Amino acid sequence: MIVILHHWTTIMPLFEDSGAYAAEQLATAELLEAFETSRKRHLIYADDEDLVLADDGANLSAVCCSGRLCWAYFLCNELASHFDYDVGDRTINQPVFLFTLVDISCARSSEELEVDLGPIINRLRKGLGDCNYVAVIEPGLYSHVTIPGANLKQSKCISWHLHALVWGMTRKKAKQLVAALNGSGKYTPVSPGQVGAHQRQVRERELASAVGYLLKPPKASYRLGLRTESVASGEPRHIQYRSALRPGERLTLYLQLRHLSLPDLWIAGGEGGAILGRVKRRSRAAIRRHERTERARPKSRSLKPADLFSNLVNDQANEVDWR
């Protein structure tokens, strides 16, 4: 009973509070609809739907719903333990900061598929140096960039950028680090009106929403425009518009991610290295357990993503209902 109580009171709540399950379910439904309705649906292979809906984690593919949920579960498990996440009031034991790093050199044409993330990761992670962090590399779709003065000359691009949870520093240190990065000129945003490095302290009781932000599947596209008053004055001032993904845009981002695994997208430094290492090992172990169970299961039994996690709590009477 002690083991069961530990999972339910210190680990499961962070996963539930993050909203990861609902976000994945919604994104998967919208992606499957895009498979059927988008004018780009001819780019989808016959087995793409099987990959998205695979119950076995599909080797932790970045586009597999069950794989993403498995990864999210164990990441929340590790972070809840590390930050001593309190079930009742959602507090943690130390300051945590949400960093974003963007650089124009990490932008690629939306037509370029199977992007090599190696140079992008090397560029973005340098800004965090020897900090303690866990981070994800994420594609941001700019669907319209044809305005004077933009830092990017392409009309449409994917801006690969980094979101990180950083800890082990003071608020003053976090501000100094971001100021130094922006002053260095090494992180140049797509829009001249923005900054390449940004940070904010995760407010009290908001760790779950910050973790959910890192785990979120793609859901928005961006456009750059000029403010009306700046056109009249002759001094261009840019504005960034954000909108929900249309079916074709959703497929564009899917195609960017299809060749990648979750371990390809997630990086860490300092204390975060051990955390991310355990997430990888435990996610893969859950998949192996699922594979052994599948071999012994009657073929008529319908499999669900929940099967990946059924061994986390050693009491079948207390299995989580994932429906």
Image (cartoon, rainbow, N blue to C red):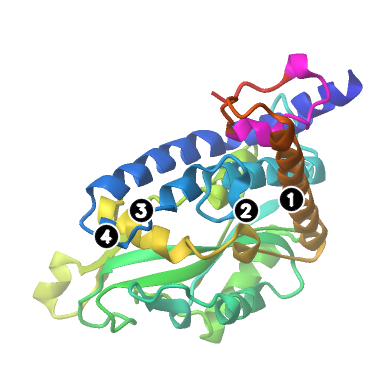
The residues colored magenta run 305-318
| Residue appearing at x 71%, y 21% in the figure | 319
- Left or right: 84 in relation to 255: right
Outermost residue to the right: 2
Q: Circle 2 — which element?
A: helix
Question: Alpha carbon of mark 2 to alpha carbon of mark 4: how far?
Answer: 25 Å
Q: Which is in the foreground here, disc 3 or disc 4?
A: 4
| Residue drawn at (63%, 31%) of the image | 306
**Tag 4 secondary structure:** helix
Q: Nearer the viewer, residue 160 or 41?
A: 41
| First of labels 2, 4 by sequence position | 4
Is residue 168 visible to the viewer in this orientation of the structure? no
Measuring from the top left, give residue 192's x and y in whole percent: 34, 77
Label for residue 42?
4
Instruction: Give the residue type that dot 2 points to.
Output: Leu
In the image, 96 versus 75, the foreground residue is: 75
Q: CA distance from mark 2 to mark 1?
A: 8 Å
Looking at this view, is 236 or 56 the one in front?
A: 56
Residue carrying label 2: 60
Classify 139 as above or below 282.
Answer: below
Residue behind mark 3: 220
Residue position for label 1: 284
- In 3D space, how far apart are the residues under numbered discs 3 and 1 (Cα atoms)? 30 Å
